[in-house]
């Protein structure tokens, strides 16, 4: 039994996975969540297990973004505001949209993805987690020859990192998912991928963490780190309670930046708002998750319904839901899946993904201080990289090391 006491801040998928692996490794774990488990992006994401998904900054995206950024119905919306941090982030993002940075990022993302896939299977089989895990692959589908050609080129790049990406015809795409419209240009089949219910995964993983002895405290908001000299020695909650620990893990999504600042640590991120709507299942049922290429909308058959999720909106840290962007999800998805047209919207949601300018997560010990570990910044990759991120955090905190080269993801890159 390891006597180390670890506080994990954040009840989303990263925090819960970290708590599970730590508790399973024998640590005394206290997880603190401001609201309820899976209350943010861990609840509403598309549910894809997308091995080798490219990072947000990629070659050619800057020019495309300039066309989109002020259109309220485009995949990317930037709401201009007098925020120096936003403009600094955008400049760094533009610099990261290079082939050199893309290759560097993909090397790390591929290594993390391969490890995470096996851990999903371990958690389902050994721990008995039930979260609608489907290891059947999924696909990106494209309406236009130009879009398909760009996707095929990207797939070849990703394939060079050991990810099983297959370029398939429109006819084969419709054989795999008959709900797709006729006349598509083609598709990319992600043979290593799959999909699942993200909210079910979080709640099941939290239950297993509690089984191993972790204390789960919801409705507990952390105000700041407790520090002594160069050490982080615990946290203070908004109610004034002080909780001491040997290590504190910040895994609080976009709110990680604010918490890290209370210990003098800089983790610059932007909250990228995503949306989803639920519509009824089709008849016959849609059975394959599809990333609907040019629309940047994902249609995932989970929880007995179809979740349409996507868009990226930089409008600050808020949960203001823009009706035109909600409507865009069903409109654009219907161009790929005609059966969705006219279906009633059963529910709507928006949430914030924590995005770094270089497109890579932040995983590791905070620089210039002791006792503070950071696990955040996964953007749209949080769900499928959560098992490996939690495992890495646990192993490093418990002194067992990490076999993956995480130099590009370390918090020290912002120091």
Image (tube, grey):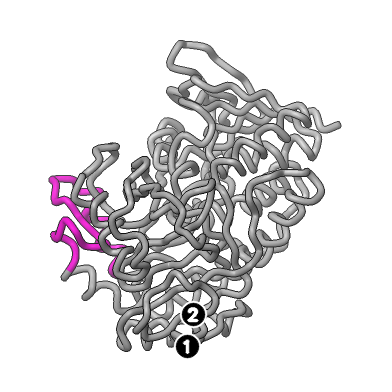
Q: Which residues are magenta?
A: 68-94
- The reply to whether callout 2 and callout 1 are in contact (CB within 8 Å) is yes
Quarter assignment of residue 99: bottom left
Please tell me which residue lies in front, 219 or 346: 346
Q: Residue at x 72, y 42 (%)?
A: 21
Disc 2: which residue: 173
Residue 344: which numbered mark, if any? none
Give the side of residue 257 with respect to residue 67, left or right. Answer: right
Q: Secondary structure at mark 2?
A: helix
Please tell me which residue lies in front, 35 or 99: 35
Q: Residue 118 appears at what percent x and percent y?
A: 72, 61
Residue 169: which numbered mark, if any? 1
Spatial separation of the CA atoms under disc 2 and disc 1: 6 Å
Q: Residue 36 appears at what percent x and percent y?
A: 50, 27
Instruction: Answer above or below: position of 291 versus 258.
Output: below
Q: Is residue 83 visible?
A: yes
Question: Magenta includes 86?
Answer: yes
């Amino acid at each position: 039994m390891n006597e180390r006491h670890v506080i994990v801040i954040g009840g989303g998928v990263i925090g819960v996975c970290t708590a599970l692996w730590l508790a399973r490794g024998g640590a005394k774990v206290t997880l603190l969540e401001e609201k309820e488990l899976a209350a943010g992006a861990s609840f509403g994401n598309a549910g894809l297990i997308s091995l080798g998904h490219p990072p947000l900054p990629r070659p050619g995206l800057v020019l495309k973004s300039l066309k989109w950024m002020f259109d309220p119905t485009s995949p990317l919306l930037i709401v201009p505001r007098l925020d120096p941090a936003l403009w600094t982030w955008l400049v760094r993002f533009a610099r990261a949209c290079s082939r050199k940075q893309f290759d560097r990022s993909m090397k790390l993302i591929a290594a993390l993805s391969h490890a995470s896939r096996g851990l999903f299977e371990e958690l389902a089989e050994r721990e008995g987690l039930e979260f609608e895990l489907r290891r059947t692959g999924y696909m990106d589908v494209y309406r236009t020859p130009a879009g398909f050609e760009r996707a095929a080129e990207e797939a070849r790049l990703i394939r060079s990192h050991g990810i099983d990406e297959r370029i398939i015809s429109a006819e084969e795409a419709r054989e795999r998912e008959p709900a797709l419209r006729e006349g598509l240009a083609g598709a990319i089949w992600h043979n290593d991928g799959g999909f699942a219910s993200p909210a079910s995964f979080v709640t099941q993983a939290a239950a297993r963490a509690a089984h191993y002895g972790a204390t789960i405290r919801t409705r507990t908001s952390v105000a700041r780190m407790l520090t002594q000299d160069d050490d982080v020695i615990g946290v203070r909650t908004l109610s004034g309670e002080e909780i001491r620990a040997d290590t504190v893990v910040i895994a609080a999504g976009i709110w990680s930046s604010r918490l890290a600042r209370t210990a003098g640590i800089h983790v610059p991120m932007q909250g990228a708002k995503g949306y989803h709507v639920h519509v009824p299942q089709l008849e016959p049922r849609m059975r394959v998750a599809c990333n609907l290429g040019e629309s940047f909308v994902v249609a995932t058959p989970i929880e007995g319904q179809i979740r349409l999720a996507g868009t990226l909106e930089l409008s600050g840290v808020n949960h203001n839901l823009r009706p035109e962007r909600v409507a865009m999800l069903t409109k654009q998805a219907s161009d790929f899946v005609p059966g969705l047209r006219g279906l009633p919207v059963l529910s709507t949601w928006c949430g914030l993904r924590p995005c770094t300018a270089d497109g890579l997560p932040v995983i590791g010990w905070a620089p210039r201080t002791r006792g503070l570990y950071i696990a955040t910044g996964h953007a749209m990759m949080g769900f499928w990289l959560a098992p490996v991120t939690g495992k890495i955090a646990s192993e490093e905190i418990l002194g067992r090391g990490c076999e993956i080269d995480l130099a590009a993801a370390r918090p020290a890159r912002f120091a």
